[in-house]
Amino acid sequence: MLIMRHELLLIAITVILLIVEIFLPNTQKHKIILPAILLMAAVTVIGFFPGTPGVLFGGMFQSTQLTMMFKNILNIGVLIVFIQSVDWLKQDQNKEKISEFFLLMLATLIGMNYMISSGDFLMFYIGLELATIPVAALAAFERLKEKSAEAGVKLIFSSALSSGILLYGLSMIYGTTGTMYFADVAPLITGVPLQVLAFIFFFAGMAFKISLVPFHLWTADVYEGAPVNVTSYLSVISKGAAVFIFTIILYTVFSKIAVMWSDLIYVVTILTITVGNLFALRQQNLKRFLAFSSIAQAGFILLGVIGQSQLGMTTVIYFVLVYIFSNLGAFGVVGIISNRTGKENINDYDGLYRTNPNLSLVMMLALFSLAGIPPLAGFFGKFFLFTAAAKQGYYILVLIALINTIISLYYYLLVIKAMLLNNSDHPIAKIRSDNYTRLGLLICVAGMVIIGFTSSIYEMVFNLSFGLY
Amino acid sequence: MSAESLILFFIVGAFLVGFAIVFSIFVAPTSTNPQKAEPYECGIPTEGLTWLQFNVGYYLFAIIFLIFDVEAVFIFPWAVVMKEMGMIAFVEIVIFFFVLGLGLLYAWKKGALKWE
Amino acid sequence: MFEGVPLHWFLITGTIMFFVGIYGFLVRKNLITILMSIELILNSVNINFVAFNKILYPDHLEGMFFSLFIIAVAAAEAAVVIAIIINIYRRLVSINVEKMDEMKY
């Protein structure tokens, strides 16, 4: 029982919230917000108690210290998203759908948990689908807005196509090996042509989910159209979980053809970082801007994946942890301003520091962390990723990534310049944020600063990832 | 079943049906009039184009039907192994139906089962 | 009944269905037709799984179960897609993909 603790707890609170939702009259829906957040907080705290690693369902479900820690990271991220979205949920247009927001989010979180501790492609596939389908419903959450509906359509169709392609690859793997268990498949991967083809299909399917170039085309549209809180969820939690399981499958199942996939990832990394950065330069809408910057960040994560070592795994997880706090901080500020004023363009942020000094400080810290400015956590995340790649001898790749970091610094600074230095005749009026928003942003800032100054977290991740690789 | 018996089955079936049709042409009394050509011989004549769009309500029902219909697919493998597994299988299917029932209850509560 | 049918016949059928699905996904303009193309892709995967299982690995039923789960998940996906399409129709009074161009580049 304790092996599946995270999942069972989440399922329990989902069922509780669903029953409450069924029997709650329509006018009382807002009362579910506080219990939902408290339950989620409780689950997050319980998740940190030491658990027993183990295997269930004959190897289909495997729980290690590493997956447990990653589930805790995801729990924290979802908790922050919950806290940040209260302000948006209290708007009139959402007042009848408050509990659906929590239910769908929890459903995707359950899917991700099953996905990251899967020991079998069947469990992996079901978890992946459970993690994507509700997100499409969330993207189309604002039923009355055309953009939101459009984002929903674009998300569900591209993810359905990608899972179709991924499944076709899986069917070939099944055809050549006769099993779906990771442990049994791994020794049978010999690099025969059908398996290479299968791997390419699998890679294309996963690249869609992580939005790597050239499979990134849906990202910007979906991120712009979906509600801000859903966008932040998509860009951080979904992406983080997908990267994690992608890395694990690459390292464990396809480790025998590592020569092949490291070439593939080499090219994709360069493309992803460069295209993401160059397109981010010309964006005016902040959500699109953050979308392209998140594509570039996914490219940086691949730097750790390509290392194929314990260090690589560690840096990937550490970077995801840092990235959750930084990106959620940035999206939190964009979210509150977009919800209160409807303004999302960079020009609208001119002179924000005069009217809303606290919000612009949080935004500045988050962007600095994303860009990788030293005292903040983002710097260490990127630094470790570069180290992991350099240790394997990928010097040219690291050089290209460094050049791209400088480009990214330029466009992050553009936003900061708009907030601090530019003057505007009509700056955004002073926003009185409620306690939930403040708490959410505070957690993000604390995360960015504390993780930057404490090395023990990195060491903990390093020790845990030893068991896997 | 082997291929021969299948082919025989097809031949006999085609013969029986064909025989009935041909036989009725010779034996049955025939009459022709304009009403014969209408889509509904004993109903009201249709008005306007028949290529009209269906009411959205049909789709809403179709969605709910689709989900609950396809979930039934999981009951087949369960039914096969139920006797061997015993009590565990029973408990599992009860949980399964509990979750399905919650979904149905939710749809009912949201008014999705009402025709508008 | 299918004893004499070699494996590659099934695989050729599956591959043709897969690429017809991909072609339809890329070319068609109607959202419902695109959904049908996706179903084609998923069903081609089902054919592959069942054929591999039946002919190459008849001892275990893994492939069969995988296709059962694909069917169930595809139904859930179709339900969400249709719900979103209904919503799109209410907003745009059309389900043509070319009408969905509010966000570009």
Image (cartoon, rainbow, N blue to C red):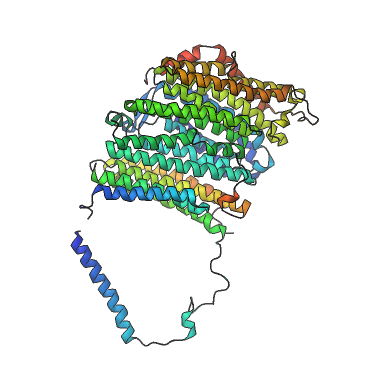
The residue shown at (28%, 44%) is C52
Describe residue C80's horizontal placement relative to residue B73 as left or right.
Answer: right
Q: Is residue A149 above or below residue B41?
A: above
Q: Is residue A37 visible?
A: no
Question: Which quarter shows the N terminus of chain C?
Answer: bottom left
Describe residue A212's horizontal placement relative to residue C8 as left or right.
Answer: right
Query: Where residue A45 sits: x, y (%)?
Result: 52, 23
Number of on-image labels: 0
Query: Where residue A186 sits: x, y (%)?
Result: 30, 29
Query: Where residue C88 sits: x, y (%)?
Result: 59, 50
Q: Which is more toward the observer, A227 or A261?
A: A261
Furthest residue toward right:
A425
Q: Which is more toward the observer, A45 or A78?
A: A78
Q: Which is more toward the observer, A193 or A123?
A: A193
Query: Where residue A231 sits: x, y (%)?
Result: 58, 34
Question: Which quarter shows the C terminus of chain C?
Answer: top right
The residue shown at (43%, 25%) is A67
Describe residue A7's horizontal placement relative to residue A254 as left or right.
Answer: right
The residue shown at (76%, 28%) is A430
Furthest residue toward front:
A396
